RNA sequence: GUGGUUGUAGCUCAGUUGGUUAGAGCACCAGAUUGUGGUUCUGGGGGUCGUGGGUUCAAAUCCCAUCAGCCACCCCA
């Protein structure tokens, strides 16, 4: 049969894994540096945990798992006959693949509340699945790297998470812009324009600002039937930007606005915006579509990459409420590993990796040399030196070709002469130099590589 | 979910207005070369032309459907 992959998924070859691990290691080490603890949750969750958490569209993008056994016997016959998929769903599927890491985290937190520290800082780096149509930098299976703090509403963590973004992208060598906004600031803005009735609409319209500028926003709001002069007023504020004193004055005319401005001041005094290697700025046009954010929101993008955001996050007041665990405030960020990978690959930001770690390949020249080579390998491995041997005394052409395939920097030939005096003839694959070495000498040579 | 675009060997692609047995480069295998490869030369294996249907004496080529990839939109990482 013809081999193929499901839509939107891919294999990772050895070299890709090395590059991906390079990214994951930097992110993981940074999370650890700030005291975050690792957790993992299952690929599948109960559908009831997942459904209704990501909006109607999210429900459609959830992968559902068909029940095992004779699932049709237990299916809702009426719904099947009517062809009503949504109605039949509950009777044929009770599990789904995780859609993000935040909801599983909230579930985990609620279930383990008594075992966890009062402030729980966790990170999680696992694949998630969405039945989205694939395109550039978008897959149906992709990794997210999340760090969240649950159980504290201190803005210290906002400051810390911005710092983590800054540090990780600096380590990766990607120049980014970290945009920050506050949901309450947006709320205040919507109020001044009389658009607070449907705040979700307001924020999704604002999300288009990035792509289409003011145009998309104006069009969307116009379609909602808002007053043209009010729309223009809001656009005017957005265009002037947060740093404009007049804008801040205007935003402070409402209670929510004052709250937001106070929090921004606090975040500033906590050093949230200072000493950063990347640009960190308050951007009034940053909305973040997901509606559960209630405080600060973040988004990271690489200017001129055409890539979309490399990560995002924010504060949500009631992270675990849906799981009957009330009053837990959370704030978190997420790194989009796939996009970071693609960007770094395109820009050539990765250091060079070798797929195989072996420092040396032993090549037996006759049948007796096979054991001899094996022993040399064992000795090197005792010293934690990665090495391997060609398994049979094949033609040298063949053995050399293999050495090239695994990009071994050294090869060691062993035949009658070598076995007699217990040495190997080592050839440096790059320079072509060839010399005899005993074990000790070989170890020193390898350590000098 | 909507629109555009592509699909020929493991990879990158050529294939004329429809016309013999569908080609090239790279890769792979063997030999020239029995303790020194990467160059060169010779030979070799490998293709239901994405899949299914239709038009035709004849389809990789034209038509329809379908699947998959890519790109844009919606949304998102």
Image (cartoon, coloured by chain):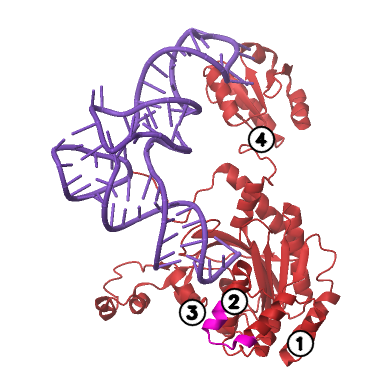
Chain colours: A red, B purple
Give the foreground label among 3 and 2. 2
Q: CA distance from mark 4 to mark 3?
A: 50 Å
Tell me whether circle 1 and circle 3 mark residues in contact (CB < 8 Å). no
User: What secondary structure is marked by label 1?
Assistant: helix
For residue A227: magenta? yes
For marks 2 and 4, the one nearer the N-term is: 2
For marks 1 and 3, the one nearer the N-term is: 3
Give the foreground label among 2 and 4. 2
Specify few, some or many for label 1: CA neighbours under 10 Å numbering under 14, 14-19, or 20 or more: some
Q: Residue at x 65, y 23 (%)?
A: A411
Tell me whether circle 4 and circle 3 mark residues in contact (CB < 8 Å). no
Q: Residue at x 81, y 71 (%)?
A: A272
For marks 4 and 1, the one nearer the N-term is: 1
Q: Which residues are magenta?
A: A217-230
For marks 4 and 3, the one nearer the N-term is: 3
* Residue A289 in view here: no
For marks 2 and 1, the one nearer the N-term is: 2
Judge from the rendering whether residue A251 lies leftward or rightward of residue B25; answer left or right: right
Residue A179 or residue A229, whichever sits in front: A229
For marks 3 and 2, the one nearer the N-term is: 3
User: In this figure, which residue is indicated by the disc labeled 1?
Assistant: A250
The location of residue A80, given as percent across then percent down, is 27, 76
Say if B13 sits above or below A106 in the image: above
User: In this figure, which residue is indicated by the disc labeled 3?
Assistant: A52
Instruction: Name the chain letter of the residue that bears numbered label 4.
Output: A
Instruction: Name the chain letter of the residue that bears numbered label 3.
Output: A
Residue A30 lies in quadrant: bottom right
Q: CA distance from mark 3 to mark 2?
A: 27 Å
Tell me whether circle 2 and circle 4 mark residues in contact (CB < 8 Å). no
Q: CA distance from mark 1 to mark 3?
A: 36 Å
Judge from the rendering whether residue A295 lies leftward or rightward of residue A52; answer left or right: right
Magenta span main SS: helix
């Amino acid at each position: 049969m013809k081999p193929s992959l499901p839509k939107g998924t891919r294999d990772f070859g050895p070299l890709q894994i090395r590059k991906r691990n390079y990214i994951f290691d930097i992110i993981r080490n940074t999370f650890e540096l700030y005291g975050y603890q690792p957790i993992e949750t299952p690929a599948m969750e109960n559908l009831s945990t997942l459904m209704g958490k990501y909006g109607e569209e999210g429900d459609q993008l959830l992968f559902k798992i068909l029940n095992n056994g004779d699932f049709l016997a237990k299916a809702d016959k009426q719904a099947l006959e009517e062809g009503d998929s949504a109605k039949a769903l509950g009777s044929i599927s009770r599990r789904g693949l995780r859609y993000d890491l935040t909801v599983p985290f909230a579930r985990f937190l609620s279930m383990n509340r008594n075992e966890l520290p009062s402030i729980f800082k966790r990170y999680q780096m696992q694949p998630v699945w969405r039945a989205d149509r694939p395109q550039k930098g978008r897959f149906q299976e992709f990794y997210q790297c999340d760090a969240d703090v649950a159980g504290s509403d201190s803005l210290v963590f906002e400051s810390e998470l911005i710092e983590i973004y800054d540090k990780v992208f600096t380590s990766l060598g990607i120049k980014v812009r970290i945009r920050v906004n506050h949901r309450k600031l947006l709320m205040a803005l919507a109020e001044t324009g009389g658009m607070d009735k449907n705040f979700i609409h307001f924020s999704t319209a604002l999300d288009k600002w990035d792509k289409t500028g003011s145009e998309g926003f104006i069009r969307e709001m116009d379609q909602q039937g808002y007053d043209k002069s009010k729309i223009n007023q809001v656009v005017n504020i957005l265009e002037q930007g947060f740093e404009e004193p007049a804008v801040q004055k205007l935003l402070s005319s409402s209670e929510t606005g004052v709250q937001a401005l106070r929090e921004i001041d606090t975040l500033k005094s906590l050093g949230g915006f200072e000493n950063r290697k990347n640009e960190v700025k308050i951007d009034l046009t940053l909305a973040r579509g997901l509606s559960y954010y209630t405080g600060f929101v973040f988004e990271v993008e690489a200017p001129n990459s055409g890539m979309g955001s490399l990560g995002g996050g924010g504060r949500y007041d009631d992270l675990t409420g849906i799981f009957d665990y009330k009053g837990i405030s959370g704030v978190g960020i997420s790194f989009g590993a796939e996009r970071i990978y693609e960007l770094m690959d395109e820009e050539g930001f990765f250091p060079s990796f070798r797929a195989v770690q072996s420092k040396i390949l032993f090549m037996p020249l006759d049948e007796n040399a096979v054991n001899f080579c094996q022993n040399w390998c064992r000795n090197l491995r005792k010293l934690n030196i990665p090495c391997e041997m060609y398994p049979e005394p094949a033609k040298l052409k063949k053995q050399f070709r293999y050495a090239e395939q695994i990009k071994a920097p050294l090869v060691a030939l062993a035949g009658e002469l070598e076995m007699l005096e217990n040495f190997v003839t080592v050839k440096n694959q790059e320079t072509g130099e060839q010399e005899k070495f005993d074990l000790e000498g070989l170890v020193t040579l390898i350590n000098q590589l």
